[in-house]
Amino acid sequence: MTFDDFLGNARIVAALRRMLTGERLPQALLFAGPRGVGKFTLATLLARAANCERGVGELCGRCSTCKSLASLDDMEELARIGRQERGSASPEDVPLILRPHPSVTVLVPDTEYIRVSQMRYVVHEAYAAPTAGRRNFFIFDRAERLRHDYADTLLKVLEEPPPKTSLLLVTDSPFSLRPTVRSRCVSLWFAPLSGDEVAAGLQERRPEWKKAERELAASAAAGSLGAALDLDLDLYRQLRGHALALVRAALADDFSPQQLFEATATLAGKATRFDEEEVPLEGRKGFEISLDILYSLLTDIVYLKVGVPNVGLRHPDLHGELRALSQRASWTRLARAVEGLDEIWGRQRRNLNRQLALDAWALGPMALSAKP
């Protein structure tokens, strides 16, 4: 992949190319934005292009540096090899350092966090002159996982940056970073991809999918090619069907008790069967997927209620049913539904009974004898 092949965020791509050709790369860059829009990919393209042996401003893909850095395309394998090489040694004694090339180092969370031992390695190595390239790069993937109590370890490098070194911090959650770290970076804010851009990426990488499947994945992913590529379409359709049943109950008192409780069990991750297999929705991450689908259905209903054209809907294939719900539901009920989801989302860190919370959310208006 080259800069010309990169999907979306053309303004950021153009800015990085100008930095390269003008040889004016900042010492610290923050790549911030939604998951799955290519932040890490673009960070690696920057490191490759800066060190490509055949030019400045682009990467050839054929020189020894480009070939070495091709391993960045499979980070899971690179991390697996790194952990295998460390063996049983302590993570504090032998930090997890992924170094596919002498001038490019990648730091990823070692279990839950990017550890202080990894940060100290960067501080120690950042002042070394490039040995096999023009510039040293240290790429922090999921930088929000920097150990909060030790993140200021990097301040020495950020405050007194070496002339031939760049730190690239990649994160979905920039405001989880320490302000002292964030304020010392030049920030690049990534936007979600358009539906057409996601569909184009799916056509290239999922050619076996039918057009309708690509369109469904593109609309469900809300501008994230990564999310679209990871989407299990069959599971997504099942979850969306259950979520729609809850929305009908919450907004229009339209439900059957059996269907409702089956829906809340599945969305809460308690269902045990799905097409003869377990439903992979255990834990907080799985529950967040369910909540995201509920939020997206409510958002589409609000758009339709105010008369927004059928552009940018997350569920365009449900247009008719969602329009009917938008006409039946009052603004009071819609506001109550959104507030209820907000409360459930905020209580996830506590000992929340997820199914009971969803039951109460769907049946709340009836329990309070509220009418549209």
Image: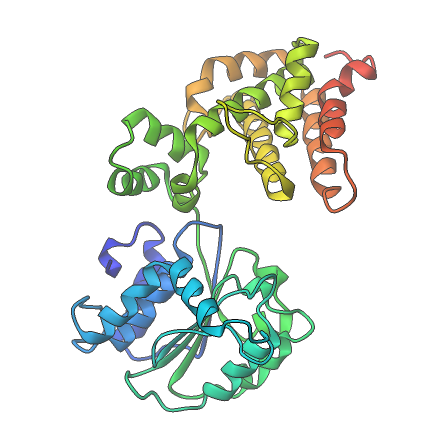
Residue 142: x %, y % from top left: 52, 61
Residue 203: where, in percent of width, then height? 26, 38
Q: For residue 279, what is the image quadrant?
A: top right
Of 90 and 186, nearer the camera is 90
User: Residue shown at 42%/23% (left/top)?
Assistant: 316
Residue lying at 56% horizontally and 60% vertically, measured from the top left: 174
Give whichever of 270, 345 is nearer the camera.
Answer: 270
Is 344 left or right of 165, judged from the image as shown?
A: right
Which quarter of the image is occupied by the N terminus? bottom left
Q: Is residue 51 left or right of residue 330?
A: left
Horizontally, residue 348 falls left or right of residue 27, namely: right
Res. 82 image quadrant? bottom left
Q: How is the image coloured?
A: rainbow
Residue 227, how many percent across, how many down?
44, 42
On the question of residue 330 being in view, the answer is no
Position of residue 365 in the picture relative to residue 138 (left or right): right
Q: Is residue 281 visible?
A: yes
- Disc tally is 0
Q: Can you name the residue that lies furthest to the right here?
A: 368
Residue at the farthest front position: 88
* Front residue of this view, candidates 218 and 328: 218
- Identify whether 106 is placed above or below 200: below
Vertical side of 108 occupied by 270: above or below? above
- Give residue 219's quadrant in the image: top left
The residue positioned 64% from the left and 18% from the top of the image is 262
The image shows residue 353 at horizontal and vertical percentages of: 76, 34
Residue sitting nearer the eye, 86 or 11: 86
Residue shown at the point (33%, 59%) measured from the top left: 73
| Image quarter in which the C terminus is found | top right
